[in-house]
Image: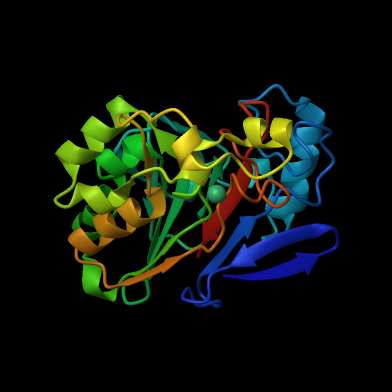
Amino acid sequence: MKSYSHDDLLAFRFDGLPNGHLRHAVFSRRGGVSVAPFDSLNLSMAVADERERVYANRRRAYGLFGRDTDTVVHAHLVHGATVARVTTAENGTWVHHVDGLITDQPGCVLTMSFADCAPILLYDPVHRAIGLGHAGWKGAVADLPGALVRAMQAQFGSDPAELLAAVGPCIGPCCYEVGEIVIDAVTAAFAQPDDLLRPMSDELRVTSDEFRAIGHRPTPLATRHSPPTTHRHFDLPEANRRNLLNAGVRHVELAEYCTACRTDLFFSHRAEKGRTGRFGVVLGL
Ligand SMILES: [Zn+2]
């Protein structure tokens, strides 16, 4: 993934997705007009940001594609595995209860907003079709990435082996502590769950708040109480990559950023305790 700037905007492009017939951008949180905690390029009305600022941000971001909020397709995300095929008729509308959008129509521009969940981008260079998805732990367990691939197979005749895929910036295993509910769901859903659920190291067990409070490296393991064995660090980007590989995809590029580590670049629901905005991903033909 490479960054590029346009006026005050800072955005990223995946190396593995060609720029030409396909256009895409992963926007950072920089270059918008929203104030804290939505600073500054918040693209979502689902948070308590001011409407005028969100619309101004959308004009800036979607404007890179010659679009505005009325000329892109939005999705009302629900952490499931439902995929909808859309056309230019859906530009300017919200598709409800989906976490995946696919299209083969030039001029149909897909967008979703994120803060820790993983953006999934798919491009079929043979049939000239695209898919955009949203997968947090629930989407990974429900195999939203696989559902996106199968929808493109069924609707456009895509061969998974020819698809170019990317998993965008999301919360990394460094920061994604999970409890029993997620551990049980991941264990049931994946063939080799153990390396997706990393044991917590001594340093990782110390929360960032605790770290700030003590202001130095945490006390060594021996002097600390035992860690709860019911907690692990979930590797969300790898889980989504595995879903894509299991669906037959061969080319998967992973973004090298953890949203919770890099709140200077992205919004993070976990790191910012829910008081934050959403960064956008845009994909169009
Ligand atoms: Zn991290």
| Residue drawn where x is 63% and y is 36% of the image | 208
Residue 138 in view: yes
Front-lying residue, 11 or 285: 11
Please provide percent x and percent y for residue 221.
47, 40
Please provide percent x and percent y for residue 100.
37, 44
| Residue drawn where x is 81% and y is 36% of the image | 34
Front-lying residue, 218 or 9: 218
Name the quadrant containing residue 159.
Answer: bottom left
Tell me the quarter of the image containing the N terminus: bottom right
Left or right: residue 204 compared with residue 7: left
| Residue drawn where x is 66% and y is 54% of the image | 27
Q: Residue furthest front?
A: 223
Please provide percent x and percent y for residue 250.
27, 73
Q: Is residue 44 above or below residue 108?
A: above
Count up the numbered dots: 0
Residue 146 in view: no
Front-lying residue, 188 or 9: 188
Please provide percent x and percent y for residue 244.
27, 59
Left or right: residue 144 compared with residue 57: left
| Residue drawn where x is 65% and y is 42% of the image | 267
Left or right: residue 141 compared with residue 285: left
Q: Is residue 102 above or below residue 204?
A: below
Name the quadrant containing residue 78.
Answer: top left
User: Coloured how?
Assistant: rainbow
